[in-house]
Amino acid sequence: MKFQQDHTEQARCRELAKSSTFYRSVYSEIEEVGWEHLVRLGGDLTFLSFRILDEKGRLHFMEIQLDKTYPKSPPSISADVPYNFDLQWSINSRLKDVVQQFQEHLEKLQEFWSTLDDIDKSLCVIGPKQPSRSISHRQINIGNDCFIMLCIDANNPRSLPECRFMGSGPFVGSLRKKWQRNSRKWTMDKPYLENLACLLETQLPRPTDVLKNDQQVECGICYAQCLPVDDELGAKSGSGTDYTCDNTTCSKAFHSVCLGDWLRSITTTRQSFNVLFGNCPYCSDPVAVKINNVKN
């Protein structure tokens, strides 16, 4: 009986020693990466999340799951990227090597993200509403109730994208034929938007152009195009949306009256003189709206 107890105690001590070694090793490797990059750390130290800035200043998060046999077995990596990298691992590898390989992977994706950022900034993108860094498609309003879906190749973002046309009527049919006819004109050395204009034989509408011509812009809070006709609203009575989120991937429209009322209901909203500062209810980017006594 005593032999069994001694054996159990020895096994427990060995496990504690292993755990202690594991903890010291992980803490040491986090130190090498830099504690300022650590976002989350699991209680048993098998889960870690690091934040990494790429060369364009974009923020990325990399989640790492460690096995108890680490570093004998490689960690599992998860990140918001269009495809994962093949982790090169050996018994002598450390967390800093994982971070370095992730940074190298981010470098390869810079042109892909820059292409998408250019599309988001320059065209009327209506979807996805809040695209993650792993998403490679964009749905674009090209006017006349017609849309195109572009799928960009993450490995070769300057190549001819897959394009799907959505809508009805002769306008869509005409654009589809132009795309098929001109697809050979796509060249890798041209700016992306210039290539699109060449294939479609037209300049695609810019975000502001579409908003000016779109008669169906609804407020993101009250879901109505126009405010009610009401003396209490003063000069705003019956008016349309007059505030748009500056985030180009959001561009949600609001009545400034509705946005002001909504911001007042949020405890984190700040006020300086007659301006309310808060966050967009859709994308959480900063918004600022001037408030007045609406009734003159």
Image (spheres, grey):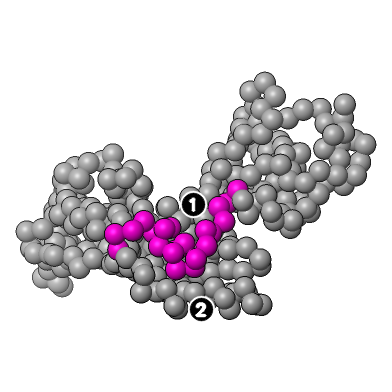
Circle 2/circle 1 CB separation < 8 Å: no
Which residue is rendered at x = 57% and y = 76% of the image? 174
Position of residue 194 in the picture relative to residue 92 (left or right):
right
Can residue 192 be seen in the rendering of this structure?
yes
Q: Percent x, y for residue 220?
A: 69, 52
Q: Percent x, y for residue 254?
A: 70, 46
Which residue is rendered at x = 44% and y = 78% of the image? 181
* Type of amino acid at the residue the image marks with label 2: Lys
* Type of amino acid at the residue the image marks with label 1: Ser
Position of residue 149 in the picture relative to residue 103 (left or right):
right
Cα–Cα span, label 2 and label 1: 24 Å
Badge number at residue 122: 1
Q: Quadrant of residue 108?
A: bottom left
What is the crowding at mark 2: few (fewer than 14 residues within 10 Å), some, or many (at least 20)? Answer: few
What is the crowding at mark 1: few (fewer than 14 residues within 10 Å), some, or many (at least 20)? Answer: some
Badge number at residue 177: 2
Q: Is residue 207 magenta?
A: yes
Q: Nearer the viewer, residue 289 or 198?
A: 198
Which residue is rendered at x = 27% and y = 45% of the image? 55
Which region is colored magenta? 188-208
Position of 86 relative to 263 (above/below) = below
Q: Percent x, y for residue 64?
A: 28, 59
